Amino acid sequence: MKREAFNHPKMLDLASRLDIPQAHAVGLVSMLHNWTPDVALAGDIGKWPNGAIARAVDWRGDPATFVQALIDSGWVDECSVNRLVIHDWEDHCENWVRAKADSLGVSFVTAIPALKHGDDAGNEPPTDPHAEPPTDPPSPPRDQTKPNQTKPNQQECGKFATSPWFDQFWVAYPTRKGRKRGRAAAAKLFAKLPEPAQLEVIEAAGNYARETGEGPNDIPPRDAERFLKNEFWKDYLGDRGPDAGDGRRRRLI
C-alpha cells in the first residue's frame, strides 16, 4: 500500500464508519491488499464470501458491515460481474503484483456497474413546443439496436475488440483445459452488439463461468464464439439461484 494512503480521506472515512482508530483502519486495508494477490490476483475479491474477506484481515465484527464500509469509503467497488473488485487495483498494487500478473497473462479487472433497464431508452428530455425547427432537418439517426445496418470497417472492429468492455468479457469468460480459445472470432461477434447488450454479455459470461467447470461432474464451457452465436448468452442473464443448473435453460452442448 502506498504511503500517501495512510492519511488519505478514504482511510479516515473507513475508520469513522467502523468506529475504529486510524491505525486499525490502515492495518485492515494493508492486510486486504496483502491477501488479494494470493487469492484474487486480478482484484476480483468478490469470488470469496464476505466472511472470508473479513477473516482474512482479522475483522471480528459483522462481515457485511465491514464489506459495506469498504465500499462506502471507496476501497472496494461493487461489480455486476465479479461482485466486489479492489478499487483501482492495477494502480495501487505493488510492482511485484503487476509483474506476476503479466507473467501469468492475468488482466486486472475494473468494476462493471449493473445495467439498469430503461436507462438507454425513453429518457429523452421533453421537446420544447416553442422551439424553432431547424432549417435543414438532420438525417434519421441510425438504429443502434441493429448492428448489421452497415458492415463495420476494420477500424471499428479493432476499436471494440480492444475496448475495456471486450477485455472485461474475456476476463469473465471461463477457461477450458486452462485456455481460452477463439478470441479474434469472439471479438468480431462482440463488436456487432450495441453497448447495452455488451454489458449484458459480460454479466452472462460471469454466470456461465460459475455454472461450468473442468471437474468430472461439471459441464465444460464451450468456446466464446459459440457462446455469443445465436444469442445463447441470453440463457445466462439475470439472478442465478441454486436451481439454475437444473436444465431448464438451454445449454451449450
Image (spheres, helix red, strand yellow):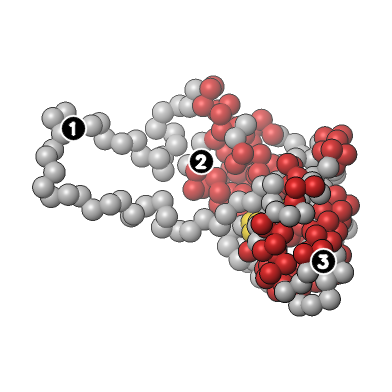
Instruction: Residue 52 in the image: state x and y as whole percent.
Output: 83, 68
Residue 207 figure quarter: bottom right
- For image coordinates 84% across by 38% down, the residue present is 95
Give the Cα separation between the discs numbered 2 and 1. 28 Å
Query: Does residue 102 lie above or below 201 as drawn?
Result: above
Labels 3, 1: front one: 3
Residue 15 figure quarter: bottom right
- For image coordinates 82% across by 66% down, the residue present is 24
Question: Which kind of residue does numbered mark 1 sit on?
Answer: Pro
Residue 155 marker: none
Circle 2 crowding by C-alpha within 10 Å: few under 14, some 14–19, many from 20: some
Instruction: Residue 154 in the image: state x and y as whole percent.
Output: 54, 22
The answer to which of 6 and 92 lies nearer the viewer is: 6
First in sequence, mark 2 or 1: give its number: 1
Question: Which kind of residue does numbered mark 2 sit on?
Answer: Leu
Q: Can the viewer see residue 42?
A: no
Residue at which label 1 appears: 137
Residue at which label 2 appears: 193
- For image coordinates 16% across by 28% down, the residue present is 136
Instruction: Residue 209 in the image: state x and y as whole percent.
Output: 73, 54
Circle 3 crowding by C-alpha within 10 Å: few under 14, some 14–19, many from 20: some
Q: Secondary structure at mark 3?
A: helix
Labels 2, 1: front one: 1
Q: Contact, CB < 8 Å: mark 2 with mark 3? A: no
Task: Report whether 177 appears left or right of 242.
Answer: right
Q: Contact, CB < 8 Å: mark 3 with mark 1? A: no
Residue 24 marker: 3
Q: Contact, CB < 8 Å: mark 2 with mark 1? A: no
Q: Secondary structure at mark 2?
A: loop
The answer to which of 181 and 86 lies nearer the viewer is: 86
Q: Secondary structure at mark 1?
A: loop
- For image coordinates 31% across by 36% down, the residue present is 141
